[in-house]
Every structure is written in C-alpha cells, then in structure tokens.
Image (cartoon, helix red, strand yellow):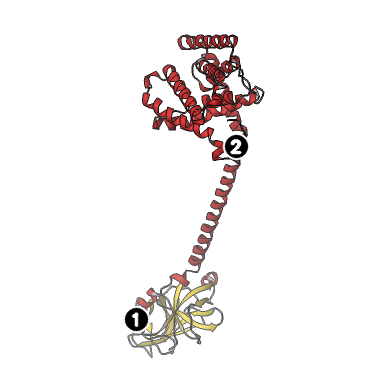
Amino acid sequence: MNQMSLIRILIILFFTNILESYISPILILFYINIPLTFLVFSYISYTSKTNPSPFFSFSMGLFVDLISGVFFGLNAILFCLMTYFINNYSNAFKLFSYFQIAIFFGVSSFFYIGFSNLFVNISNFSYQNLIFSFFVNTFLCYLVTLRRLLLPSLFKSNTL
Amino acid sequence: MARVTPTSGSKALYILCIIVASFLLYLDINYKTFDVIKNQYNSLLISSSFALKKISIDPISYIYNLLQKNSDLINENKELKKKLDESYLSNFIISRDTKFFSDGEHIKSFMEKNRIKKIFHSSVVRYFDTEKYFCCDQHQFFIEILNKSDGNFIGSPVINSQGILGQIINDDKYHEVLLLTDTSHSLPIEADGFFCNAKGSGKPGIISCTYSSLIWPEPIKKGQEFFTSGLGGIYPRGVLIGYVSEIKILDKTNFEFDISLVSNPMKENTLGVLERL
C-alpha cells in the first residue's frame, strides 16, 4: 500500500466503524443497513494503484472483527473475497460505467449484509432489509462516483 | 499503470486466507476461542476512553462547574444582599413605625369618647428620660409632630388614648412636652362643682390639689373622678384626669389630695397634639 500507510488505513477503519455503530441503530428503523467499514475498505482497495495482498485484506478483516465485536474471521473472509474480486476485475472496471461500478459495490454490500446476518443476526434476517439496503448502497456508491461532478472544487483527483 | 490480474499463486493465497478465516470463524462460533482477546480489547477501549475523558472532558467540565458554582454563589449573594436590604428597610420602617403605621385611630376614638371636636396631629415620642421621670420632679419628653403644618404648637395639649399627658412648651426641631406631673405644671380641674388648680407632684402619675374647707365645704372622697375644667384655656373641658387616691389633712381647714392620673406617658409611643384652643 504505497498511497496510504497502514496506520492511516487502520485509523480510517477504526473511526468509520465508530461512525457505523452510531448510524446503524437509526437506519435500521427504516430497514436500511449501510456497511460503511466494508465500503470504505472496498473503496481503499479499489483506488489502490497496486493489488492489495490477501494477507493485508485478511489482517484488516481481523482488525475490523476485533473493533466491531463480531466473530473472528467473518470480516476477514469477506474482505479477502472483496479484494480478490476487485483485483480480478480491476482492469475490467475501466470499461464499466459509473453506474455499473455502483451496482457492483451495491451487490457486494448486499452480499456482505446477507452473509454477516447469517452469522451475527440470523433470527432477524430480513429480505426487506437486504433489498432496501441494496438500493440505498447502490445509490450511495453512485453518489461517490459522481462526487467530482457534484463537488468539483473539493474532489480534483482523476481516480474514481 | 494497470493493475495485474491475480495469478494462480495469489489465488491460492486468497483461498488459504479464506480457509484460515473460516477456521477462525468456526473456532470463535463454537468454542469462543477469541473471547479473551475481545474482552481485553473492550477493557482497553473502556479504560482509554475513561482516561481520555478524565484528561480532556473532566477538567473542562470541572472548570465549567466551578464557573457555574461561582455564578450561583454570586447570584445567591445578590439575593441575600437584596433580602438584607429589604430587611434593613423593614426594620427602618418598624423603628420609625409612626411614619407609616400610626393611623391615629386610638387618638380619634379617645377624642370621640370625650367629644373633643378639634384637629389633632399625630406625633411620636423621640426622647423621654424615664430615669429622670421616676427620680426627679422635672417631667418632660420630646416629641416629633408628623405631617405638621406651619404653625406654632406651643401650648398645644398632648394626649394619648388614655387621656391628657401635658402641653408643648418649646417648639424646636423636636417639641418639648411638659407633663402634668411636672412640679411646674398647673392644671385646672373640677369635680361636682369643685374647682382646683392641680399641680404636678413630681411623682409619676400623681398630681395634687389643695383646698380649704371654708371655701369648699363638700368633702372630697377617695376614688372621686376629676375632669379638666377648661378654665386655663389650654386643655379642653370635661376630659377625665384621674381619681382621688389619697387625702392629706394639712390643718383644720386645709386639705391636700392626690389624684392618680388615668394617662400614662409611657403607655404609647404614638401621641396626638391638639391644635390650640
């Protein structure tokens, strides 16, 4: 990770997890689940100029497991899978439109929420929650992809 | 620079990591193997947040509370000062009660009872040397007339709710009142056609009168009532002065009797000053 130091990523993930812990109880009232930590990690992996190693994803996953208090290995698996897909399709993404990329991340978050709920929250597993979250996350990712158009003075980077 | 697609070697690493993660997940779900680590992390998190709170928020909170406390104390001090001022004012009013509370009703009732149709002015005793009153034959005190109009009050009778006390003899800032019992005072009195000039005895509450049986053959009895005769032109007529308390025989024809006054100058602080006749 040349662009961003490991410490910096850990700090970002730590505070994102805190933010997620505050907003999740509010959003769940509207059947919405936004896995902010997962999306931020995915964004970091996606914008990285080099392929993140599987050990990096694995260790970041364990770190998130630790700070979020879920079963050890849950985020490690999902982070590894996400990094694998991003690495695998990193060149193909260049051919995708912003909307397609947003859908990719929306589907990823859909899968993440479903998989997490299977282990953590099986008794309250809700398809309604999954569907709503899919649309909201896709829209959110789409907004992120359009950030340079929406706020050009703030985001001048050419990367997505 | 384009990113390299994962090779089969790196794919194997991913698979390895996922297998290890799955194994960890299995251990954690079934055996809670990592609970110790999680608990230690939570403990560290709580301790550090507590420590951070103690070194960051608590001092600010302490300063804020201190300021708030100071502010409360200042407000309380102001409130107490205000109450103290009110108390001072209240005490001042009580100490100078006649200014505010003397309504003169008791004087009015006395005047109505004795059918005195004169204007009176409320007054208050300012100085009364009671020691001198009890020991010596000079009986005076000083009064202040409230709401006084311009005019000379010398010779004006001074009364309280019991009766006549004396007359004003000096008109200064405070008015000097000569009491009936002063030895220099003389009061014309009457009872059943008997007239006499009663002089102050110098004793508290006693005036005395002398008469000759050759002039007034009717005997004087103890307990007999005496009234003002109005002959001196100072006091109104027909006001009860007192009762005969003691009769002394001076010689065969001359007698002296004491009259106990019905009015006590120490009874009330609020008095009335009648306008001169």
Q: Residues within 10 Å of mark 1 (few under 14, many from 20)?
A: some
Amino acid, disc 1: Asn
In screen coordinates, is A6 left or right of A66?
Answer: right
Give the camera-side residue of B121 and B222.
Answer: B121
Q: Position of residue A134 (x, y in %)?
A: 43, 27
Count the numbered circles shown: 2
Classify residue B57 by image quadrant: top right
Question: Which callout, 1 or 2, points to the residue nearer the camera?
Answer: 2
Residue at horizontal 46 percent and vertical 12 percent from the top: B29
Instruction: Evaluate whether residue B266 shows in this view.
Output: no
* Chain letter belonging to callout 1: B
Q: Position of residue A133 (x, y in %)?
A: 43, 28
For label 2, the residue is A155
- The outermost residue toward the right is A2
Residue at horizontal 61 percent and vertical 20 percent from the top: B3
For label 1, the residue is B114
Q: Is residue A101 above or below residue A85?
A: below
Q: Position of residue B44 (x, y in %)?
A: 58, 22
Q: Residues within 10 Å of mark 2 (few under 14, many from 20)?
A: few
**Same chain for the residues at labels 1 and 2, yes or no?**
no
Amino acid, disc 2: Phe
Give the camera-side residue of A124 and B34.
Answer: A124
Q: Secondary structure at mark 1?
A: loop
Q: Position of residue B263 (x, y in %)?
A: 41, 75
The span from disc 1 to disc 2 (Cα, nearest Å) is: 107 Å
